[in-house]
Image (cartoon, rainbow, N blue to C red):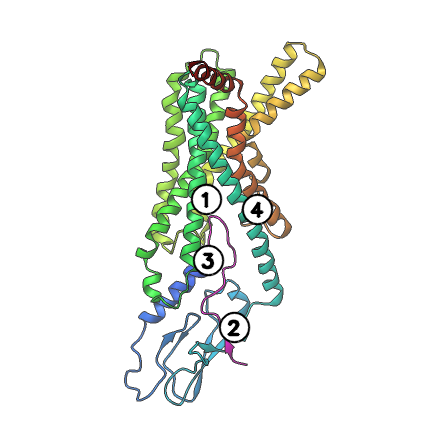
Amino acid sequence: MMGLERDWPPCQDPSPSAVCPAWPRWGRAGSGCQMGGVQGRGLPLVCNRTFDKFSCWPDTMPNSTASVPCPWFLPWYQKVKHRHVFKTCGPDGRWVTGPRGQSLRDATQCEQDDEDLKAQEKFARTYGSFKVMYTVGYSVSLCALLLALALLLGFSKLHCMRNYIHMNLFASFILKGVSVLVIDALLKTHYSDKIDGYNVQVWLSDEAAAGCRAATVFMQYGIVANYCWLLVEGIYLHNLLVVAVFSERSYFTLYLCIGWGAPMLFLVPWVIVKFLYENIQCWSTNNNMGFWWILRFPVFLAILINFFIFIRIIQILVSKLRAHQMRYTDYKFRLARSTLTLIPLLGIHEVVFAFITDEHAQGTLRYVKLFFDLFLSSFQGLLVAILYCFVNKEVSRTAGARAGGHGQGA
């Protein structure tokens, strides 16, 4: 039975930083079809070669039905690659259309299996809830981080090496949060507009995607820089506790290079390989996971180093607390408080799923990992701002003294 079909393939795997691969593949199919061949040369009457936003149809004789394989851009193509889609050429040399001029084709053989479709719809509903959650998380975190950064910058008494590092960490969280929200907005705009009103080649051109790619590069830099500053916090704490003679200022330039400079060592090669080998749409798909590992490696390395630093710091804290010979309950309380404070500062929670890659997370594990990553990543900035600024005694005293001074002056 021939029916009306939607004009573009459905998105299969939405995420804050990765749009489904069906879109760019569909774009390449449309561009290739429009550029290929000369329509109707030497034939008196034919339905001309066309791309109807689903398949590329060859020149076809009137009163006949064209048959082409299911389009290769479908995410479930491997399951339907031996099947076909059909389209009828009318007696007047025009493709048969619906009552409103809609493209008409029989693609029932190429449809997704009911089981896969239900799984896709379930994931889309679940991800919709996750998206609301992480959007709220990043928004709240941004407000808290901006206020925390303003407090540390505004009070000169708080200007010390420890707080300089905290300020840069806050700035990296802000950069990460802003970039994620911006790329979300751009991807929503880029992929939700109605396609019919645009020429396929123009809509899918590199020029149209340039701004989106720039935002993706900005986002990737923000993410890697954030992990690098978490690593700097770990290195600073380790040096403070372990190095006997520790000159803080002599290391600050090195910290700046690690936090803001090191991400460029990985981002530039990633941009080059994406431009040369995966120059499609927003650079938000990862067809070659080897390219993605260029950015994943420094993140994974930072998490691993911080985990070992965390273990070492806990060992040092245990030995120092024991040396004071305090009561066991006080000892446990202070150790637990120190441990819980270090976890968000060093990003130790990332270790839980660090060894489970996106490629191997399936089924329930995929949902758990996605929730864990999105929830903690979006609210981590808020937690860091609270622990290292809003409830910090030094900040509270300084802010209280400033407020008291203004009150007396009034």
Q: Earlier in the sequence, mark 4 or mark 2?
A: 2
Q: What amino acid type is highlighted by mark number 4?
A: Leu
**Measured from the top left, where is residue 398 in percent x and y?**
47, 17
Q: Earlier in the sequence, mark 1 or mark 2?
A: 2
Quadrant assignment, res 332: top right
Q: Is residue 86 shown to the viewer in this render?
A: yes
Main SS of the magenta segment?
A: loop
Q: What amino acid type is highlighted by mark number 3?
A: Pro
Residue 3 is covered by the magenta coloring: yes
Count of number-bearing discs? 4
Residue at the spot of label 3: 21
Q: Is 249 drawn above or below residue 47 in the view shown?
A: above
Quadrant, the C terminus: top left
Q: Earlier in the sequence, mark 3 or mark 4?
A: 3
Badge 3 marks a residue whose secondary structure is loop
Residue at the spot of label 1: 293
| Residue 370, label in figure | 4
Viewer-side label of 1, 3: 3
CA gap, disc 4 and disc 2: 34 Å
Q: Residue at x 36, y 50 (%)?
A: 213
CA gap, disc 1 and disc 2: 33 Å
**Measured from the top left, where is residue 272 in percent x and y?**
34, 47
